[in-house]
Image: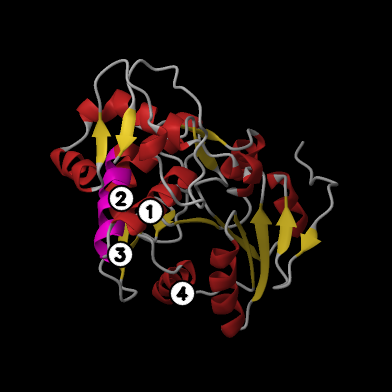
Amino acid sequence: MLSASKSIEKKTDQNILSIHNIRNILQHISYNTWLGIDLDNTVIESTQELGSDQWFENTIKYACQLHTDKEEACRLVIVLYHAVQHHAEMKAVEEIIIRIIKRLQNIIPIIPITARGESIIRPTLRQLGKVGIDFSPEEDLIDAKRIELDVGGDHPAVYYQGILFCSGMDKGKCLKALFDYLKKFPEHFVMADDKEKHLLSVKKVIEENGGRFTGLRYGYLDEKVKNFNMIRALNQLIEISHKLSLDAQLALKKLKIKITSPDTFFSKKNSLSSPDIHLMEEKSESRTEAKLT
């Protein structure tokens, strides 16, 4: 039997609840609730440092320091991120989330809202499937399997097999576009996400349209994210580097990430200078090493 956790919830200054256990969402579900839930670091997480949300964010920081053209820097990292996701494996952040999703799917509408884009829809569905999660409801909210939603970005948001792929755009705007398409709006919307900014953007949309919003800032992986190890991620990148696309190989070159010969190690003088990038100074267990130069 599923039950809500008794752990203490804390409110942030923006009236968003902070939770550490995903089962706490059950406390906020009622008959008229719709549930929105993030994927990375909320439902699933990478089995290694490479391919994780924190790897992506730290690499973005590095690239923006390296390139004066911030848009180009982000584009290069996204190319690399997409290539890595074709090889990355995921696991449930908390095993109980699999049971919670399956149980709630028979009771209320669930909309996963991810910053991932349409380019990695297939890898995302593969990763979720291996974990044992399928967000395609038996009676879908939308008859069509794929819906493109124009929210004013370079790429559309895409609703596919029950998941809203936002391509890095504002989650609130993407969700609003989906509601407009549906011509439906929930009375009560609960959303769980590890990033407060996404909760606030969705909160704004829900409340502007007369709905009641409950935001849950999920912090189960906070400590793991804080202790992200870039050296380990770079060594994991070596292991799949030969499988990456030509575009990803070019992105590596432009990002000055070099795959070096065996028996070399990550050089301290080549490490990222910014304190914002957390690098653990330790030797790799691998016989090969990557360098940021």
Extreme residue toward the left, this view? 246
Find the distance from the CA under tag 1 to the CA under tag 2.
Answer: 6 Å
Find the distance from the CA under tag 2 to the CA under tag 3.
Answer: 11 Å
Q: Which mark is residue 93?
A: none
Q: Are the residues flagged by discs 4 and 3 in contact, CB closer than 8 Å?
A: no
Q: Main secondary structure of the magenta part?
A: helix
Q: Earlier in the sequence, mark 1 or mark 2?
A: 1
Mark 3 lies on residue: 70
Q: Is residue 274 above or below residue 203?
A: above
Residue type (three-letter) at the residue carrying disc 1? Ile
Q: Position of residue 64 (x, y in %)?
A: 34, 58
Q: Which mark is residue 60?
A: 1
Find the distance from the CA under tag 2 to the CA under tag 4.
Answer: 28 Å
Q: Are the residues flagged by discs 1 and 2 in contact, CB closer than 8 Å?
A: yes
Let me know if residue 101 appears in the view.
Answer: yes
Indicate the secondary structure of the residue bearing disc 3.
helix
Indicate the secondary structure of the residue bearing disc 1.
helix
Please state the total of marks drawn on the protein image.
4
Residue type (three-letter) at the residue carrying disc 3? Lys
Q: Are the residues flagged by discs 2 and 4 in contact, CB closer than 8 Å?
A: no
